[in-house]
Amino acid sequence: MRLKLLTLALSLAAVSLPSHGEDLLDAYRQARANDPVLAQADATRLAVHEGIPQARALLLPQISAGMSLQQQSITGNSNLGGVSGNNGATSGHERTRSISASIDQTILNLSDVANLQAAHSTADAQEKTYEAAAQELFVRVASAYFAVLNDEEQVAVAKANEEAFRVTYDQADQQYKVGIAAVTNVYQAKSLYEAAKANTVTIENTLANDRQALSVITGKPVGDLKKLRPDLPMDPPAPADPQAWVDSSLKNNPTLMSAQLSVDAAEHSINAARANHLPTITASLSRGKSTAWLENGGYNFAGNGRWGNTIGVTLSVPIFSGGATQSKVRQTIYQRDEAQDSLELTRRQTIQNTLNYYNSVLAGISEVESGKAAVESAQKAVDATKAGFQVGTQIMLDVLTSIQNLTSAQSTYSTARHQLVLNRLLLKQSAGTITYDDLQSVNSLLQ
């Protein structure tokens, strides 16, 4: 009877039982609201976008107003406005008040124009970086979620394995005590039983860590999670052409697009640096007045100022700035070269990742199918070995080995199932086409 219960426990360990807990979409919605990585990317995106109005402001009218009041001590001969003291000697203060307002407008400054273009490209690049972070969130949530699910199945397998070795150890011990088995059987069974207990503790610790990792993303404690159902679709990627996926990634991958826009921004920065060699033209209009008056003992004299307008156009021609302009041009060229190298590296990595994930999906389908067959065969081997041990055709070591083989097959099968689902998402992420609908499709595989 105990052998039958053991077989049933091992079989159930590989099966995902129904659950009414949280699902993948619940975890994603929590992460969308609380994930600090995505929030950081959003804040960076908004900050970089502010570079556009700042660059544009240099090309728009600059309006300013001011007022000044100055006082100057006067001692000496004076005949200001016909007013004089004894023998023409004066002493007192002369005060001047000036009021002005001005408006300046850039007519020609190619450097500022190029800087504005660079700001636009930089902002667009950061927009794509944020889009990549948003797509990455789909995968990060799914990866953390399925890590927990896989850990839970691994714990179930480990506990069933531990129980199987415990039952076998008890049986060997009883047989030894009644004199129908050697003590070697007891030692072998006990050794594997103790190792199985230690392995269970290790896997339970991994589960606790992975649950905490999911909580870091969602910002919420992790409760009971819905499990992956036993029957998974075994369809190959569509389209079933790796080059089509590569073409999609080169066209749609947001990280690659961000790298290209960074190169564009660097090109505009080179133009801005070179334009510092060129003349600039600025128009200005100002209006103001200045009033001065003299305070001299008991005499006050004021000269009332009149409002005056000044209109002008300034042409500024840079001739030499100590080599700073040439250095800035060289610096921006080096930065452009760096951006181009980064773009090429990103392009190659994108192609590599896309092909790797495509092949991983195909290999994963075979692994799941063969893993399922391996579990079924290992289960039959356990049953046959135990039956042979009962009639004396198999030894205790054969039973222990068959249990180990079943546990290994169950563990591999569980990992392959969860990794296959995740690899499908990773393929779409690399191709730049992953959406919320893809997460919904994966969520439909839970129960």
Image (spheres, rainbow, N blue to C red):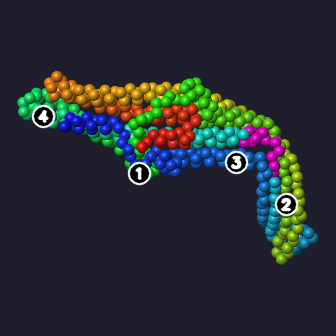
Q: Are marks 2 and 4 in contact (CB under 8 Å)?
A: no
- Quadrant where the N terminus lies? top left
Cα separation, mark 4 vs mark 1, equals: 44 Å
Q: Are marks 4 and 1 in contact (CB under 8 Å)?
A: no
Secondary element under disc 2, as helix, strand or loop, is strand
Is residue 209 at least partly visible in the picture? no
**Disc 3 crowd, CA 10 A, few/some/many (<14, 14-19, 20+):** few
Are discs 2 and 1 less than 8 Å apart at CB? Answer: no
The residue under label 1 is which amino acid type? Pro
Please say whether residue 110 is one of the residues in the magenta stretch.
yes
Residue of label 2? 288
Q: Residue at x 62, y 42 (%)?
A: 127
Q: Position of residue 107 (x, y in %)?
A: 83, 45
Gap between marks 2 and 1 measured at Cα: 67 Å
Q: Which residue is mark 1?
A: 221
How far is mark 2 from mark 4, CA to CA?
109 Å
User: Which of the pair 341/86 is nearer the observer?
Assistant: 341
Residue under pointer 3: 54
Q: Decide if residue 286 is on the left or right side of residue 131.
A: right
- Residue 433 % position (x, y): 58, 36
Find disc 4 in the rendering and name its residue.
Answer: 173
**Which residues, given as a range, are shown in magenta?**
104-116
Identify residue type, mark 2. Answer: Gly
